[in-house]
Image (spheres, rainbow, N blue to C red):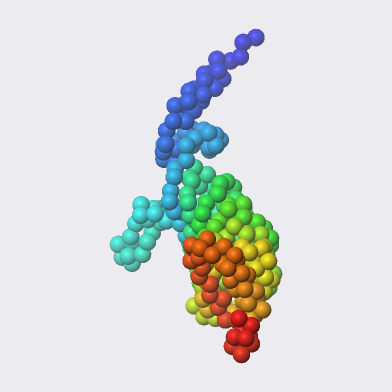
Amino acid sequence: MMPAMPSILITMMTMCIMRLMIVVMTMIMIRLVNHRLNDIVQRNYELFSKLHLDGLCLMGKNSGKIARFNPNSYRRNSTSNKAVYTHELEVPQIDRPLRHVHCNSVTLEHVKVDYIVLQALKRSLKYSFRQMDFLYCMLNVNNQAEFAYLLREWNVQKLSFAHCNWPENSEFYSISDKLFEFNPQLQHVSISFDKVTNIKISDTTLKKWASCTSWPRSFILHNVKSEITHEGVAAVISSYVAQARAKRDKVFGSTILWNFGVVNTSLDWLTPTL
């Protein structure tokens, strides 16, 4: 018995459409034409070319939704002059457009970074990218290892946290030794706050860098009081100096910029150690 003709035609049409669409570069726009094209693109997104972006900025809204920021994604309210975003999505839905994008850097601004957000980003960004920035984010992640491992999975080399915060419960500290233990690939780290803030980075991280003779080229703590002491600072600086003497020009070929913030020691202890 021959299969019904309509079924064959639908299958053939889908195959033909996919053949034509595979060579199209603007999949992220094609999928908006109608529901059928969107369904085809979403089901077969791995076959299509990606939209390449230098940077991707995701902004959290008061509604709890997330908007992608770019010059064409919002308009100005004629009365308040505030930005009104034309495309806002619930967090579980952000992977639908983002899976068609490939970018070099990702910025999260005013986003409540929790398990749901991390899972959505994990589904969306299945590739390596160089830079990730968190601006004015609430870090509501109670699994430090999962957060740190995801950064390693993305192979992030340049990482910054600016004006972020988290719940008072210490379980939610996302910026800790665990972050650096899981991410030896980090080359540039910047952590800054408006006022002096405690974080859980200790001598453990600096001594690990010293023993492995591998460290970030820039490590900047601004308005940060950590658990770092003169022992950790002395260990990593001594290791750097020893490597500099051994390799000479090879070491000094790249600039090292370290600012350890408010170190938990006195100058009287630190000076003789160095």
Quarter of the picture holding the C terminus? bottom right
The extreme top residue here reads 1
The extreme bottom residue here reads 268
Picture residue at 43% right of the left edge, 48% below the top: 53
Q: Is residue 33 above or below residue 233?
A: above
Residue 64 seen: no
Query: Where in the figure is residue 136, as x and y percent of width and height?
Result: 50, 68
Q: Nearer the viewer, residue 238 or 181?
A: 238
Query: Where in the figure is residue 226, as x and y percent of width and height?
Result: 62, 77
Picture residue at 32% right of the left edge, 65% below the top: 81
Q: Is residue 73 above or below residue 21?
A: below
Q: How many marks?
A: 0
Query: Where in the figure is residue 254, as x and y percent of width and height?
Result: 49, 63
Left or right, 137 with reference to 2: left
Quarter of the picture holding the N terminus? top right
Q: Nearer the viewer, residue 140 or 80?
A: 140
Quadrant of the rendered image containing residue 242? bottom right
Picture residue at 61% right of the left edge, 14% below the top: 3
Residue 223 seen: yes
Quadrant of the rendered image containing residue 138? bottom right
Q: Nearer the viewer, residue 93 or 217?
A: 217
Q: Is residue 41 above or below residue 114?
A: above
Query: Where in the figure is residue 212, as x and y percent of width and height?
Result: 66, 63
Picture residue at 62% right of the left edge, 55% below the top: 152
